[in-house]
Image: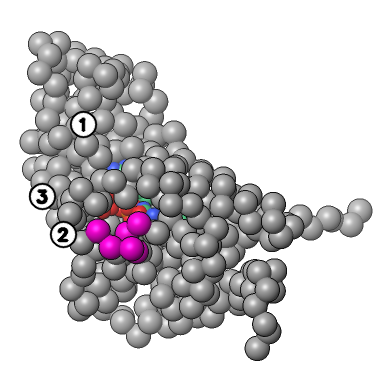
Amino acid sequence: MEEVKVAKKRMLSGIQPSGDLHLGNYLGAMKNWIGLADEFDCFYFMADMHTITVRQNPADLRRRTLEQMAQYIACGLDPEKNVLFVQSHVHQHAELGWVLNCFTMFGELSRMTQFKDKSAKNAENINGGLFTYPSLMAADILLYQTDLIPVGHDQKQHCELTRDIAQRFNGIYGNVFKIPEPYIPKAGARIMSLNAPETKMSKSLPDGCVFLMEKPEDIQRKFKRAITDSDTENCVRFDPENKPGVSNLMNIYSAVTGRSFEQIESEFAGCGYGAFKPAVGEAVIETLRPIREEATRLLADKAYLEGVCRSGAEKASYVAEKTLRKVYKKVGFLPR
Ligand code: ATP
Ligand code: LTN
């Protein structure tokens, strides 16, 4: 019998090269990008255009963009099987971003929590790009007719706005964009800071943040110092409301070992926090070790990484151009 070929669903995601990649990025987003290339058509990029919504040192931004590419590959993204590219290398993002700006409402953008958080943190530079960031993110996604967006929980609101923009556009012009869905992991979607478990792990709080390229002894020190809860129970039990510190460590341990919370509770029954914290540190170190080693090796070969960027941009551009042409025609731009 003849086999019927079903088109693969498309996955797309990006991370801003605004700082070094950390465990939150890895467990919330990247871990769900890996090993899917046989089942999905995968596109992953460095969101450098989003990064300049906050002022950057140009040399650092260039260096981090290439380092991030090395870390994507080191995590297991084979550039032969996944399209890996730099956002600013594919001009269609900026072009569709402009068009979608004209289909995104001021009120919608005003409600975005990331905008509110970032404008509170950068009160001296609340620029237009920071405000319209979600229209560019919608363009990133919709250009590729994406089905699934593997991201951490904090990006859910942006993904929902992307769907609204796509539906609005399709409602006027017909079926131009595929309506995408966020793909958020069960364990790891919201990793909290090790020393402030009420706030998300973020590079802007480096003491409570574990970086992918960090030395094992530094990682272990951060886990040993992780804030556990001030209850007298001293017992490893999942209870995010009353025990946010321990629950966050359990979430991390579950995400890196694949064990359930019940399994973790029985593994550490009667052990107390003193034994649990270094065990989580050790499990994280062993997860990150091969990534760090491979990324270091790749970074020594700049020409290879630049070649990956070039061929990724070509493949991405080919797909993006098809959507952009269609959009330009629909909105009434005169063909060149
Ligand atoms: P910032 O520190 O500026 O808030 P960030 O570290 O959150 O930035 P992003 O580029 O905004 O980095 O996020 C990249 C991806 O990592 C997104 O999919 C996001 O949801 C995910 N992510 C970031 N932090 C966490 C976290 N603490 N837990 C789970 N996922 C996270
Ligand atoms: N907004 C995201 C980064 C990002 C993204 C995207 C993620 C930009 N464009 C498209 C998924 C799909 C962030 O700040 N984490």
Say whether disc 3 or disc 2 marks the residue closer to the N-terminus: 2
Horizontal side of 267 relative to 41 (left or right) equals: left
Q: Residue at x 63, y 56 (%)?
A: 169
Tell me the kind of residue under disc 2.
Answer: Glu
Give the magenta part as a residue range.
126-131
Find disc 3 in the rendering and name its residue: 218
Seen from the viewer's position, the closer of residues 312 and 284 is: 312
The mark closer to the camera, 3 or 2, is: 2
Could you tell me which residue is drawn at 38 percent across and 29 percent down?
Answer: 259
Question: Residue 87: x and y, percent?
Answer: 43, 71
Helix, strand or loop at label 1? It is loop
The answer to if 104 sits in the magenta stretch is no
The residue beneath circle 2 is 124
Instruction: Using a 10 Å C-alpha cutoff, classify the residue at mark 3 as few (fewer than 14 neighbours), some (14 to 19) or many (20 or more).
Output: some
Q: Disc 3 and disc 1: Cα gap in Å?
A: 22 Å
Can residue 55 be seen here? The reply is yes
Q: Are marks 3 and 2 in contact (CB under 8 Å)?
A: no
Crowdedness of circle 2 by 10 Å Cα count: few (<14), some, many (20+)?
few
Q: Quadrant of residue 275?
A: top left
Give, as a three-letter code, the residue at label 1. Answer: Glu
Q: What is the distance, in whole Å, between disc 3 and disc 2 at their CAs?
A: 34 Å
The location of residue 108, given as percent across then percent down, is: 45, 47
Q: Residue furthest right?
A: 1
